[in-house]
Image (cartoon, helix red, strand yellow):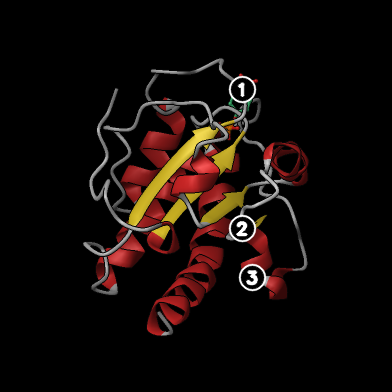
Amino acid sequence: MFKRANGNVTPERSVLFVCLGNICRSPTAEGVFRAAAEHAGIGQQIRVDSAGLSDGHVGYPADRRAIQAAWRRGYDLTAMRGRQVEVADFSRFGWIIAMDDSNMRALTKMKPADFGGHLGLLLDFAPELGIRDIPDPYYGNFEGFERVLDLIEISVAGLLARVQAALAHE
Ligand code: 4NP
């Protein structure tokens, strides 16, 4: 399994993106957020990861269309491997970010009562868009992957600002 960096940081500095398969949307969000964090100079201080609700793609690379669309914009998703979200993630990650309402419902059911972090939708960080779900691109065409990247790039900026603000108050 791919070993991610920064494994020992606190939950407050740990962000987990979750979708259904962990091969299209959440690996894209992970790659875009990591790049944004590095650009902001806090890449070494935070942990970023992604996971899927289904176990259908555990151990597999991201979808090649997601890899290609991301690569064209300067994000490298090639090292990522699918994994399934687990209850222990609620102890390790203070930010658990769902791609759509269906993911949100499943995560809300999994969430331990004592979870003290933030569980929410990625698009809540881009309220100006007026949409809640990052559409699942898996059964669509390449344009769908471009749309996913557009939405993720906008909302990740809002999320990063919130994470940075929280860190400033630590
Ligand atoms: P993701 O996309 O949730 O963005 O990774 C999907 C990938 C695979 C499937 C559904 C969605 N699938 O049904 O296999």
Q: How many marks?
A: 3
The residue that label 3 is drawn on is 126
Image point (33%, 32%), residue name: 80
The response on whether ligand 1 sits within 8 Å of label 3 is no
> Residue 96 appears at what percent x and percent y?
56, 51
Crowd band around label 1 with a 10 angstrom C-alpha radius: few (<14), some (14–19), many (20+): some
The residue that label 1 is drawn on is 54
Q: Is residue 20 above or below residue 162?
A: above
Disc 1 residue type? Ser
Q: Is residue 165 above or below residue 21?
A: below
Image point (29%, 22%), residue name: 1
Q: Quadrant of ligand 1?
A: top right
The residue that label 2 is drawn on is 122
Crowd band around label 3 with a 10 angstrom C-alpha radius: few (<14), some (14–19), many (20+): many
Is 21 on the left-hand or right-hand side of 103? left
SS label for mark 2: helix
